[in-house]
Image (tube, helix red, strand yellow):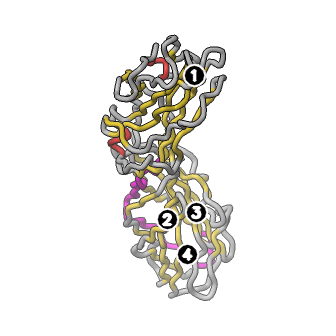
Amino acid sequence: MPRKLAIRLGSVGIAIRLITALLVIFIPARLNVTGEGRLSLTFDYKVYASPATQTKYPNPTDIVTVEEDPYSNNNWTTPENVGADDAAYASITTPTFDSPDYSYIIKALGFGFTIPANSTINGITVEVERYADAAEGLGKDALVQLYQAGARQGSNYADTVNDWDTAPTIKSYGGATDLWGLTWTVDQINAADFGVALAAQATTINADIYVDFVRITVDYTPPPADISNTPNNWNLGTVIADSFYETELNNFTVTNNSAYPVTITISGDNMTGGDTPWILSDTATPGPDTYGLIAGLEGGSYNITVPQSFANTLVGNLSNVSPDNSQKWGLQFWAPTSFDEYGVSKSANVTLTATQP
């Protein structure tokens, strides 16, 4: 009667490596060749991934003007117009706006950021579209500063040297790695009292100045994704020596415990140990010394090849709209078509990679 080959995949230790904006999760699978028995795999890990840096571009919804020394000579008309990029302008066109008068401060708050908790704030960029009427008179920046916790704080990035252009022009202040001389928390950025202070100064007699919009870009790195996989045990049937063997589907559940979507890809390694390595087929087609792995999602075809030279998508955009949003998936193991090693151990890695799209 044919000999039977039992393959046991023992307890799995997880090594977590952070690569650029990804975390690669290794699931070592150890095969112990001992005679008749079963093939088993144990999962026991909590997965973390570092998503790519994200950027947001909202506009303010709470816009008022305030008189603060020395920004106290002329008020703005329709200051609420700076809340949208729509060619509707806040303006000062009164004939009494003469050099060296200052405008009131446009206080633009209520940007509505929803940056995930525990993110790292990397930089803040303010953009203002504005111009001055050359036929009437010119103006320039006097104040471009941020509101933190409702108070003007940090660097004033106003260009107090150059007059505004005489055609609508977008001027940028700060940058993707510029914190304006301040330390920021996510709560401060998401707060309703976070925003921009903007004021101008006349540089000629009867200056006429216009502002179309004020907007903020915040560059930040979200917290690591929190992903888990269950169950922690995978029991397969007996592998028969010198014959092709395909396991039954083995089902798992991958869960995204994060506050944002993730994409999960899957790949694997060659199995080492013994005299002859088992090569993982990039097409999941077994051969004399080649084994295959194939995966799929519940309710779909199990046609996701687990390759070694590249990664295939296992779960795309697994969002966490509700707590513990999860996706069931399955994995099949195809043994080599023939082999003659008994009583040896082989090991390999199955790699899940989680990123934020």
Determine which of the numbered discs, if any, sits on residue 240 in the image.
4
Secondary structure at numbered mark 2 = strand
- Residue at 55% over, 59% down: 266
Query: Distance from label 1 to label 3 (Cα)?
Result: 67 Å
Query: Distance from label 2 to label 3 (Cα)?
Result: 16 Å
Q: Position of residue 201 (x, y in %)?
A: 50, 27
Viewer-proximal residue, 55 or 205?
A: 205
Q: Is residue 116 above or below residue 151?
A: below
Q: Is residue 200 above or below residue 18?
A: above
Secondary structure at numbered mark 1 = loop
Determine which of the numbered discs, if any, sits on residue 267 in the image.
3
Determine which of the numbered discs, if any, sits on residue 18 in the image.
2
Please state which of the two labelled residues, at mark 1 or mark 4, is closer to the viewer.
1
237 is within the stretch colored magenta: yes
Q: First in sequence: mark 1 or mark 3?
A: 1
In the figure, residue 166 lies in which quadrant?
Answer: top right
Q: First in sequence: mark 2 or mark 3?
A: 2
Magenta region, residue range: 220-248
